[in-house]
Image: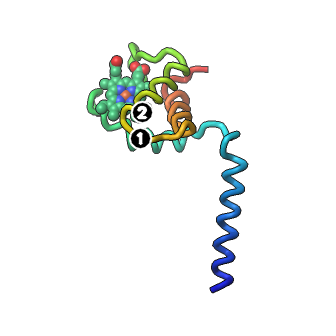
Amino acid sequence: MMKKNQGCMQRVVVLLVLMGVSGPVAAADAEKGRVLHDKACAACHASRFGGDASRIYTRPDHKKKSKQEVAAMVAFCSQNLGTQWFDEEVADVTEYLNKNFYKYP
Ligand code: HEC
């Protein structure tokens, strides 16, 4: 029993260390962003663009013309929706959208 608990604590410590190392300094994570985006944002966009959630970003007359504008829109929409995303999560979603659709430098 004691041994099992120790193993568990060790894993918690390792996790905390990893989070400490990779947390604030890590680059935005597009894969995490994809998961967040698919959960909170994709269905509504898809419903307005013939079932294709990516078209809102890739249509020739899309509105957001820079990575900053995309980031601002992600922050605005996530706040409006009440997602309670952290800044890191807003950055992850922005990274996902830019990497896959907008491709701004
Ligand atoms: C209830 C519907 C709805 C939800 C939910 C929604 N959006 Fe949107 N979003 C829209 C509509 C409609 C537009 C297009 C507005 C326009 O064309 O001016 C849009 C546009 C955008 C654009 C700009 C696309 C362009 O033209 O470049 C971004 C970026 C965006 N949304 C991000 C998000 C993110 C991130 C979320 C989730 C946190 C989200 N949206 C949730 C309806 C929604």
Point out residue 11 in the picture as x, y percentages from the top left corner. 66, 67
Residue 87 image position (x, y, % from top left): 55, 36
Tell me if I can see residue 70 in this picture.
Answer: yes
- Mark 1: is the Cβ under 8 angstroms from ligand 1? yes
Q: Residue at x 67, y 41 (%)?
A: 24
Q: Residue at x 57, y 38 (%)?
A: 88
**Residue 23 left/right relative to 104:** right
Q: Which residue is mark 1?
A: 83
The quarter of the picture showing ligand 1:
top left
| Residue type indicated by callout 1 | Thr
In the displayed structure image, the side of residue 48 where residue 96 appears, left or right: right
Residue 4 placement (x, y as % from top left): 64, 80
Q: Vertically, is 16 above or below 41? A: below
Q: Label 2: state its secondary structure.
A: helix
Quadrant of the image containing the C terminus: top right
Q: Identify whether 105 is placed above or below 36.
A: above
Image quarter where the N terminus lies is bottom right
Most foreground residue, 100 or 42: 42
Which is more toward the observer, 6 or 62? 6
**Based on the displayed image, in which of its 4 quarters is residue 49 positioned?**
top left
Q: Amino acid at mark 2?
A: Gln
Residue 23 horizontal/vertical position (percent): 66, 45
Q: Residue at x 51, y 35 (%)?
A: 90
Task: Residue at 68%, 83% (x, y): give it.
Answer: 3
Relative to 51, say whether 70 is above or below. above
Is disc 2 in contact with disc 1, using a CB cutoff of under 8 Å? yes
In the image, is the residue at mark 2 within 8 Å of ligand 1 by its beta carbon?
no
* SS type, badge 1: loop
Residue 79: mark in rendering = 2
Residue 45 makes an appearance in the image: no
